[in-house]
């Protein structure tokens, strides 16, 4: 922790600050410059978390030296984490994992039809929402447990791993019975109650970045899960909110490389939400692979005109298949495989 | 709902669209222009919610005509809502309500000391967090039920109404036993599970705008609560996330006038979170009153240097008192009172 | 300047860094912590501007200690600047200055009519654009020098000071002949060529904040003008670009208090551009005054339905007059006057 | 143009609106719905540009039907434009063009050294700034005409085309004598005076997207140049400003696919500015190629520690060379070549 004093800070203010921080076990190194005095505090930076140095008289600004996350950092664990999703399906290695399926689970038959198609094209994880976070209370809210059953059955029938969204800490146990992977949606990235609950399971959790969350906040939310004991966390960039309205969200492609540098956890990209329109999904997916992501989550629907949610961003199965062919080439170009 | 066709849309595509929408009970009015054909759909716009017209071949764009919210709108209820917080404390009328207190409840004694001070200065609602949403799992997470008890006791001792944050649908009942008003924090504005649960109570709910939520989304979240039967909802602008880093958030002061035009619900401003630094709180609070807000929520702490959270944005009781004097003058200038 | 080293930085990297910076006349203070080594550089921080310390091996991050601006800062000049606009019209004192008029100058008669109205209501500076920055090449681009003549004549006829926008360094001399104050629009805030040219005059310059400029960048642009010798600079918040679309821009009301703390220059608010809709202009103007601004710029048009630009955000003269009455009360409440 | 009336709009207001617009040559199609009346105006939409329909009484909102740009649109010109940069160097075809070089031109020798390296690695256009837009007036402002001479000489010596930034309409002629391509920087994207001046030349212009410009605004700025007669315009995404601070800007990778759909003009990506740190440049460059861009602009410096600007984002020549190898593979994967 570094503290920069105001130009007119008094010696008394400086001594007050040092006395208080020494009482917390920190040692102060003082550099008196021509225009400002700077103090570097040596010791357990964490104790300063509950002492807001900014409010001490004479303090101009406070600069943290250490990142606020630990377990998720590359400093804590240098080698990249490879996480088992199911049997021989792993994420974080050379293989890029593709998760595909409809936004919402609508019926057993429809889900099975889509699953067969995406499996054939190369996807290994089936996605589908049973509990849907909808902006409007009047929109379709998902099939609930019935949808979870369909997901499990279709997953078993096709040999795919399954992923579905959990929105409520009370549903963690229920969803855990049916799905291989928990998905935490963007709107729940800072639902800390839910994160703690998921930290007490051992199932993989895919944590999506919030619409206006910084990369640091994404890592802090992952830290919540790891700090409770569950290290099987996968991150996912799904577009952030900016002033641009030509697309539904702005895919922060930079985030892929930044995250891979800061953490050992795998990083995915969701090109469907990050663009919001099916005709831009392909470009975004290819960009994600080229930038170094470990997985993709793509919405596919056999009949987007009748999709109960997010039809505009869903690919038809035949488009998905042809995109997979293109993605395979890009993956090879960056020495990965799909 | 208005649909604009692509310049090269075919007659067949147009007929396909009309056939599908007529099956939903809508009537199509077609305007053929030189460069584009436009279709206005007359009828229950809601049925289009689950039919993504954007994906129909030949469609360029879709423009909704009606706002997606109903019960919260001024169209539904022209006169402004006045909501009873406790006994003779109401929000939404001529009186501007000031809610004040510490960020976190730290002890019975500390809370009582602050409560007496803010009461004396003119605040009528006591705030204080018992369950704290903290970015880091290593930060102070609140006293839980013990804190709730202190809040209730201090509220009764001082004759103030009380407000505290609820983060988890499972805590709705517990918190309801102790607090007069539920606070939904910015990070939970789209925690739809929680909103539905609060909609089934009859207690006032103060709903804070999310960091990157549009005004329309704020109203949609309020609609969740009203649609379940609880009309006692108070909105609160607490700063949005932008590129500016000189303050913790950017107070969207425009939102006050916009919200007052669109909805009958009361609108508050939280200048503490909207600035993040105590020295800017006064200016933001005065701006809020001048812009027409119905209430203010202000953090006050007797000893910010030892606050367990948000010390940097807390006012000392004496600063709060002098600010209240200034706010009274501004309130009078806009024909309100504090 | 503070440099934080990477956890695995070598002694050799540290010595390389010290050697290079000592050659620039800086002295290094080293604090070796448990997890990081920190170096505080004492000496003329400016020399580091052209030496990107971030790229030195072993460096994790670089933290500047001093603000990058000087002449505009309160450290350089403690007392607030009062700037003479014309004869007895000054900005920066107890009096809040109101600049009003049409977006574009359309004719001599129309300008005179509006000028008389706003003068009567209490405005002392007449605004009107002769050179218009329009997003589209097909939109009305202004009357040019003819418009400037009208502005000067109407200013003289009514005894008002005048302000008009300068977009091109080549027009500085021309506009200087006709107008009392130069206006630099948001899109030109970082047109450094223009800023330098204006710095070589002695006329007041009103510098509007760019749509996505930070407060620090606004001050740096002002510094360009002051550094060339012209200290008569007035700043203006006119709304920033965010994700919110209910208003044309988001008025960053916090910026008023932040700017007043950092600089001695006067700070204005433009509620017309900051909202984009006439019905929200009043609330934004009152918020600006309550937050402590030194002036307001408001668009007024006698016939918004025929305005050649920005009709939607223009007030009718009678609405302007009644707003001025309200503003007078708010000004008194914050111990200022209009 | 579509106009949606307020629910309580009167018949008189409707007739007033129709009368005014018919006088402008438009024909109104009225659709009376249960909750709203909608009017579709058929005819030359442009005439409505100077008649702000939003301010007519009874109007709730106005929805434009046509894009505000024409010459740049795919509707105007279906086939993609291929623009000649110099001799046999073209952009917009199968070949992806790489422009590389230092941020600022610092000396003839240094520029020549870098040029030889980037040429060898496969770049065909040499970049280098002689006039630099710097946030601070105290930063290095470029060598001016001397730098232009070095650029021309080194371009000729290496057989590369050259590009340099023009910041001032007065410099268009001068820079045109030395450089093959004009670069308009992000801060000048809406310097309309400059755009018009460039529209009157026939040299290629690379127009960079502003930090907070929408894609539509980028296209409108290009329209300024085309509307004056110069169709040789190349667009460039260089990162937008968002709340994320881990990188200097946020590369809006979606913009590549969106722009390629809306316009026939070539689209480039600048991964150096879009990230701000050399270690993220590679990932961003690969993402740009995978997403379908027509060119890349990359900063390269032989000695970033002594670069007079932007050292932190410059690649060393050897890193650039190895990146070019990787880019070649990605280009092949998307059926292009470098």
Image (cartoon, coloured by chain):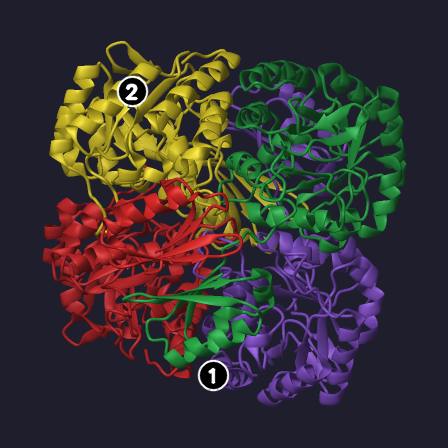
Chain colours: A purple, B green, C yellow, D red
- Residue under pointer 1: A326
Q: Alpha-carbon neighbours of circle 2 within 10 Å: few (<14), some, or many (≥20)?
A: many
Q: Position of residue A92 (x, y in %)?
A: 64, 74
Q: Alpha-carbon neighbours of circle 1 within 10 Å: few (<14), some, or many (≥20)?
A: some
Asked if A320 appears above or below A235 in the picture, the reply is below
Residues at marks 1 and 2 touching, judged by CB atoms closer than 8 Å: no
Work out whether residue B131 or residue B292 is closer to the camera in this orientation and state it.
B292
Asked if C263 appears above or below D154 in the picture, the reply is above
Q: Can residue C277 be seen in this view?
A: yes
Work out whether residue B186 or residue B206 is closer to the camera in this orientation and state it.
B206
Q: Residue furthest front?
A: D11
Q: Can residue D110 be seen in this view?
A: no
Left or right: residue C49 versus residue A47 is left
Single out the mark in the foreground, 1 or 2.
2
Work out whether residue D21 or residue D311 is closer to the camera in this orientation and state it.
D21
- Residue under pointer 2: C117
Q: Position of residue A187 (x, y in %)?
A: 65, 56
| Chain under numbered label 1 | A
**Image quadrant occupied by the N terminus of chain D:** bottom left
Q: Position of residue C103 (x, y in %)?
A: 28, 34
State the SS at label 1: helix
Left or right: residue B103 versus residue D97 is right
């Amino acid at each position: 922790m570094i503290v920069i004093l105001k130009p007119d800070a008094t010696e008394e203010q400086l001594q007050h600050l040092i006395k208080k921080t020494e009482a917390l076990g920190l040692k102060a190194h003082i550099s008196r410059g021509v225009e400002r005095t700077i103090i570097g505090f040596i010791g357990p930076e964490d104790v300063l978390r509950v002492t807001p140095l900014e409010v001490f008289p004479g303090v101009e600004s406070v600069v943290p030296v250490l990142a606020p996350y630990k377990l998720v950092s590359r400093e804590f664990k240098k080698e990249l984490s490879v996480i088992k999703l199911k049997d021989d399906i792993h994420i974080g290695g050379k293989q890029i994992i593709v998760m595909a399926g409809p936004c919402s689970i609508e019926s057993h038959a429809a889900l099975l039809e889509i699953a067969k198609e995406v499996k054939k094209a190369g996807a290994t994880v089936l996605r589908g929402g049973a509990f849907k976070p909808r902006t409007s209370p009047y929109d379709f809210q998902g099939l609930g447990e019935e949808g979870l059953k369909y997901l499990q059955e279709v997953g078993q029938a096709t040999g795919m791993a399954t992923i579905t969204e959990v929105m409520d800490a009370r549903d963690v146990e229920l969803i855990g019975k049916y799905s291989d992977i928990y998905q935490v949606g963007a709107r729940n990235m800072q639902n800390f109650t839910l994160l703690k609950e998921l930290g007490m399971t051992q199932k993989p959790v895919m944590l999506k970045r919030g619409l206006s969350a910084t990369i640091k906040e994404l890592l802090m939310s992952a830290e919540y899960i790891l700090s409770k004991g569950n290290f099987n966390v996968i991150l996912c960039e799904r577009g952030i909110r900016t002033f641009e309205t030509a697309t539904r969200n702005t895919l922060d492609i930079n985030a892929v490389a930044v995250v891979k540098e800061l953490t050992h956890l795998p990083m995915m990209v969701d090109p469907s939400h990050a663009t919001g329109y099916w005709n831009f999904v392909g470009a975004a997916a290819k960009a994600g692979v080229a930038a170094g992501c470990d997985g993709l989550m793509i919405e596919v629907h056999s009949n987007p005109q009748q999709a109960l949610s997010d039809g505009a961003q869903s690919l038809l199965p035949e488009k998905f298949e042809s995109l997979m062919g293109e993605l395979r080439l890009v993956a090879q170009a960056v020495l990965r495989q799909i």
